[in-house]
Amino acid sequence: QVQLVESGGGLVQAGGSLRLSCTASVRTSRNYDMGWFRQAPGKEREFVAAINWGGGRTYYADSVKGRFAISRANAKNMVYLQMNILKPEDTAVYYCAADLKLRTGVTASSYDYWGQGTQVTVSS
């Protein structure tokens, strides 16, 4: 029902910025919350940020608060993750995910659909 494609990853120096985009191809009339997760080599996938359908509620992992911002443009079926003041520890594959049950969850199990991920590498 929902296909997700991430873009915008790349190599950036510490202190720099990147903006990730997630394009949703939606074959449902249902609303959906969105989240961003990341997975570094040898580590489990971890929550980064989430946003509800209306965009009025957002949640962030403590490690990215004040540096990352999640937003969405429902008319375009797009979700964004603006990442500022990037650190080497932000290096990971970043995934967007969709939740049709509107839980705006902070765990991977809350999400029904996932993209294939985009690599973000922050050099020191």
Image (cartoon, rainbow, N blue to C red):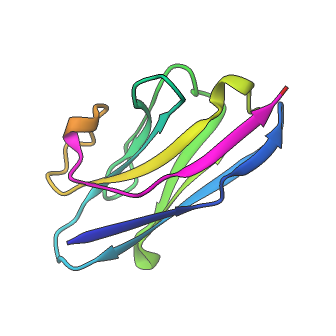
Instruction: Depth check: give the residue in front, 65 or 13.
Output: 13
Instruction: Depth check: give the residue in front, 87 or 123.
Output: 123
Q: Is residue 105 above or below residue 113?
A: above
Task: Kindly give the residue lying farthest to the front in the view shown.
Answer: 42
Residue 63 as seen in the image, left or right of residue 110: right
Q: Quadrant of the C terminus?
A: top right
Residue 73 placement (x, y as % from top left): 47, 68
Residue 49 placement (x, y as % from top left): 45, 38
Q: Is residue 62 magenta?
A: no
Residue at the location (41% across, 73% down)? Answer: 77
Residue at the location (18% across, 76% down)? Answer: 28
> In which quadrant of the rendered view does residue 30 lie?
bottom left
Judge whether residue 84 can be spotted in this image. Answer: no
Q: Is residue 118 magenta?
A: yes
Residue 46 as seen in the image, left or right of residue 19: left
Residue 112 placement (x, y as % from top left): 20, 52
Residue 67 as seen in the image, left or right of residue 113: right
Residue 113 placement (x, y as % from top left): 26, 56
Q: Quadrant of the N terminus?
A: bottom left
Judge whether residue 62 can be spotted in this image. Answer: yes
Q: How many marks?
A: 0
Instruction: Depth check: give the residue in front, 25 or 69.
Output: 25
Residue 51 as seen in the image, left or right of residue 81: left
The part of the chain drawn in magenta is 110-123
Residue at the location (74% across, 33% down)? Answer: 86
